[in-house]
Amino acid sequence: MEAVQVLMDNLWVAIGAILVFFMIGGFILLEAGSTRMKNAGHVAGKTIFTAGIGTLVFWAVGYGFIYGEGNAFIGLSNFFYGDTTTAADAGGLTPAVDFSFQVMFAIVALTIAFGGFAERAKLSVYVIFAILFSALIYPVVAHWIWGGGWLAEHGKQDFAGSTVVHLTGAMAALAATVILKPRIGKYNKDGSSNVLAGHNQVYTTLGVLVLWVGWFGFNGASTFGVADGFLGYVILNTQLAAAAGAVAAMFTAWVKTGKADVPTTLNGALAGLVAITASCGFVAPWAAVVIGLIGGVMVVFSMQLFEKLKIDDPIAALSVHGTVGVWGTLSNGLFALPALSTDIDWGKAGLFYGGGWEQLGVQALGVVASGAYAFVVAFVLLKIMDKVMGGLRVTEEEEIMGLDISEHGSYGYPEHMALEEAKLTTAATKEKFS
């Protein structure tokens, strides 16, 4: 029976790794659908090769920086993974299954970070920053919280990554957005903004559904086994929060604008998922609903705030993963059940369960430290890249024609874009000879 248990644990986490990787497909649909047609192929394609870069860097140094023997700041061993231990030898998760699961989280964090580059960054910037983020930013924060680092020693709770994955990726995205500045045509001289609508709401909707399904592996397999069926409890909390977030965001937008905005509803579902990621294994189902509801409302106002601040965020990464990532992290300090935290020696009970302010304070410390580290290091690295590379952004002409053709030499929608070019050429010819 023990051998069967080991095999089942490994099988479940391996399935979880596959589900998390499939979330990359959700990001492709979501980001491509949320951007304009002339950039759709670029947005989709760069996600694949950056996932490849992230995987190789994680294999070389990332995993070692997180889980290797080292100090409270960073791990310093287990580089270039090569362990051939089997399930029978390990008596638990094999190192290969654990590595395969962990690398998927690194790739997701990188994908979130690139939301801040959308529709204006050079392709070479993606290549270089993918290496730097995967080596110097994500592994450090992950070590602090998941690898036995200094925040783990303080009892920081982050079951599946509201801080480690989502906030870290969002703060890197914020640094990129600030440096790159808004897309051409986004803001007018009088301070008003224009809607640069994504080209395919069906893609974005399907992308969110794929992400939602993948999140059951993201959170559920973070149990690292099937013992006692606890994975079902985690999946239940995940589903409840996502549902609450979608409903809350839709009704909030409906009340504010008189329209049940589809992109806002989709971001509400993602907000519920991000919010519950830190606490899906620590809170009661009713708390999961509350956490998702608040996340769904917050994402609406956060998107409006960034718009007013003239921070151009085409994918809403800053709001969905950043603002709500903060809320999800702090919610543990409020709602964590004693039986799911204190009794397993993972932090303290939340404020509402008699734990006092200690756990909330630890969660806040984790937000500030992790968020500041990710933003500052990303900002410095991007500034250095900006100087060395002669700019991070494509030229004005390249941005206007679209990154599909300027960076890749072909359109994601070649027939449609060829027709549009023909119309523009005809109009220009008529104007010339009229």
Image: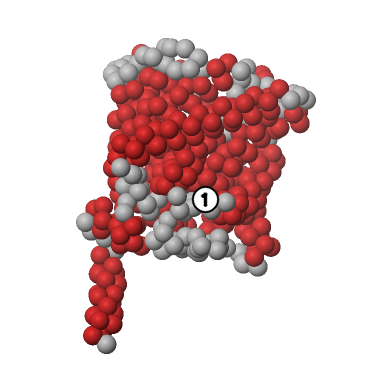
Judged from the image, the secondary structure of the residue bearing numbered disc 1 is loop
The amino acid on which the numbered mark 1 sits, given as a three-letter code, is Ile
Q: Please tell me how crowded label 1 is: few (under 14), some (14-19), or many (20+) other residues with Cα within 10 Å.
A: many
Image spot of residue 258 (x, y percent): 65, 68
Q: Circle 1 sits on which residue?
A: 311
Residue 376: give x, y in percent of width and height: 48, 32
Nearest the eye: 91 or 77: 77
| Residue 385 visible (yes or no) | yes
The quadrant of the picture occupied by the C terminus is: bottom left
- Expressed as whole percent of the image width and height from the top left, the position of residue 427 reads 29, 80
Left or right: 251 in relation to 377: right
Give the image quarter of residue 59.
top left
Number of marks drawn: 1
Out of 402 and 192, give the one closest to the viewer.
192
* Residue drawn at the location 58% of the way across and 16% of the way down: 153
- Please state the horizontal and vertical placement of residue 408, each as a whole percent of the image: 24, 53
Residue that lies at the very extreme toward the bottom in this rendered image:
434
